[in-house]
Image (cartoon, rainbow, N blue to C red):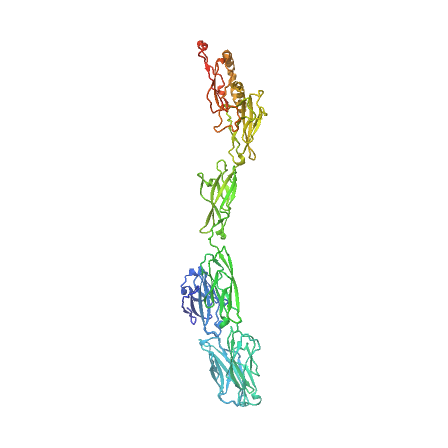
Amino acid sequence: MWEGTMRRQVLLFMWILSLGPVRGQISYSIPEEMAKGSLVGNVAQDLGLDVKRLRSGRARIYTGDSVEYVELNRDRGVLLIKERIDREALCRRTTPCALHFQIILENPMEFYSITVEITDINDNTPSFEKSDMKFKIIESSLPGTKFLLERAVDPDIGINGLQSYVLTRNDHFGLKLKDQPDGGKIAEMVLQKPLDREKQEDISLLLTAMDGGEPRLSGTAQIYITVLDANDNAPVFTKPVYKASISENAPKGTIITTVSASDADKGSNSKITYSISNTAADVRDLFEIDELNGNLMLKTQLDYENERKYEIHVQASDEGGLTDLSKISVEVSDVNDNKPVINMMSKTNIISEDSKVGTVVTMVNVQDSDSGENGKVQCAIIENLPFTMKSTSSNFYSLVTDSDLDRERASEYNISITCCDEGVPSLSSSVTLTLHISDVNDNAPVFERSSYEAYIVENNTPGLSIFTVKATDADWNQNARVSYILEDSSVNGVPVSSYVSVSADSGVIHAVRSFDYEHIKDFHLCVKAQDGGSPPLSSNVTVKIMIQDQNDNAPQVLYPVQTSSSVVAEMVPRSADVGYLVTKVVAVDVDSGQNAWLSYKLQKATDRALFEVGLQNGEIRTIRQVTDKDAVKQRLTVVVEDNGQPSRSATVNVNVAVADSFPEVLSEFTDFTHDKEYNDNLTFYLVLALAVVSFLFITCLVVIISVKIYRWRQSRILYHSSLPVIPYYPPRYSDTLGTGTLQHVYNYEVCRTTDSRKSDCKFGRAGSQNVLIMEPSCTGTMQRIQNEKNILDEPDSPLEVSLCSYISLIY
């Protein structure tokens, strides 16, 4: 609402358009000269929009290249005056005078056309270009003679424009008004009573121009009249109206047309001069007339887009002061001299890659100031891009998507929009829009391989980096940020997380524990790569971790068995030939590969010239014929060494008895026992000796006396003898070369009594054993003290002492 004359009329009409995002149009009417901040209209209410939509859509006013007189308050949803509006400066005399602009909203893009009509107020006073007018009138002029007066100018229109003229009362002249086609009025001063120079040579009058506004405003001009001697005829134009046309690109000085007038007088009174009168100052700046020949010429180049038609009033005057009036109507013809002007209505240069086909990217406003065919414009995109131009309304185009977008294929587009008019020759303009495609999380991470294999050497340090998996995501920024996750699974019933861990950022797989190849040789795990999108996308890959063997185990000798309770001896007959298989050292290495490749070497031997060890198979064979000079007891030390780096080894002592019969062997058994004991752990014996010495110190005397008493009874008993017990090879062992001399297996049972002459040797059946085992625990002579003498002397009932020794010979 406005006080007084500043009242607002709101004319609201809306319609739905079928193309593009144009949603409706609304019009307002306001008076000019409103104060800044004044209300134009509640656009949110009139368009049916929520104020929140104005804020979320970043609503703004688009005016193209024009001055923005009206602003939008998004918080209130109203249009306000931004700059003072002067209707006369904005539209001159064009009616109606209106502001045309659009309200643009984004997400989704919409625009509404707004028209604000500017109504006139009486803010301009009629004025004359010249403050005074001078006439020379011959005294013989007849009543009814007309004299053209300068026209007043009032920039206002309608009732507020120039309405009438008033001439001060006088005895000779009256005022006559003539209406013009453009709505203006021309004032003519008419002689009503003959003049008499002798009575009054000079006359002064006041001309007042008044508008019809409220209050009425007026302007004045002074008229000075000089009365001359007689001049009978006034000049007369050949035409009341001259019509001419000129091209807007006509150069300066071009003759547009020529006016002509004649005067029936003779002499100086017939001499005519031409001038432009009663014409606006801005028009007189464009045209000039030759005062002698009446040629209307162009003072400066015209512009069809500024003004298409000009009305020029021309006056012909003779020397006697008589005049005639004519009008020249000049029409300006259009030339295709203006390129289309392209204006981007939206400032947004980003669109999501998941936008649907037909999504509006931006609105384009195209203006061509030319008219007719010269002003018709067509816009298009030249390149083969997934966008197209659609005409939504007059001078407006929508840039819309024509196919699906993919940021990973093209992250931005340089869209060149070309607009051409239909003039001859055609003029065109282009503008380039750089459109960025925003990312959507539509790509899952992709591993470099479909599966991985990684290796780690056993006995590793916990925390050691094993391998790195790498996945890439074609998306961008947060959507491409990949995190690595170890999927839950188990290895031999144990969670895989107790074996390895995966770095979430780098994908590095670390060992959680130290691996042992002998317990686990390989295992599988699953790693998930997950991006940072919402919702996140992921992919999995399988990694096979293979444990590599390390030479961390020494060979283990399976045969011959080394025990502290018995001594194993291999028996070789003295008739053995070269290559005779004595025994075979059997060893294993729990490592794998070359770490488990074993080689056998003879480290020490009683007679190195008698035996050799197979490098690969560990077989101990004779390398020469056995002779009687060879010692019965032979001791070999064999080193079993693997092929690792560094290598590991184990040693085994092999005792060999070179004899053809058991009595020969038995005599050496004691020494075998001593040798076995000699090789035991010395530290153990030292500790044991310390404890035993203390005990023996106390009991030494008692033991000595006891030994003296019973020595005569023990003289016939075997002195600490040991009968060997022969063990057996592993069930699958055999002599592959078949070079042994004993082809059958025999068991022997040896029994002795207190009388060595009554010892007995019994042959048993063939068995499956071919080694000689000596049991130290059975080497001692078991004694039984006979209290009754008759029992001791009875020959048929000897007290036999079994030595619990079994001798088995196998070959």
Q: Position of residue 563 (x, y in %)?
A: 50, 25
Q: Is residue 32 above or below residue 471?
A: below
Judge whether 540 appears above or below 700 on screen: below
Q: Quadrant of the N terminus?
A: bottom left
Q: Is residue 523 visible from the viewing direction of this image?
A: yes
Q: Residue 435, how many percent across, how many down?
A: 50, 59
Relative to 328, residue 75 above or below: above
Residue occupying image coordinates x 52% and y 76%: 332
Total marks in image: 0
**Is residue 551 shown to the viewer in this render?**
no
Residue at horizontal 49 percent and vertical 89 percent from the top: 143
The residue most toward the right is 609
Observer-nearest of 205 and 502: 502
Residue 442 placed where, x, y %?
Answer: 46, 53
Of the pair 202 and 76, the residue shown nearer to us? 76
Between 490 and 50, the residue placed more toward the observer is 490
Rendered location of residue 433, percent (x, y): 51, 61
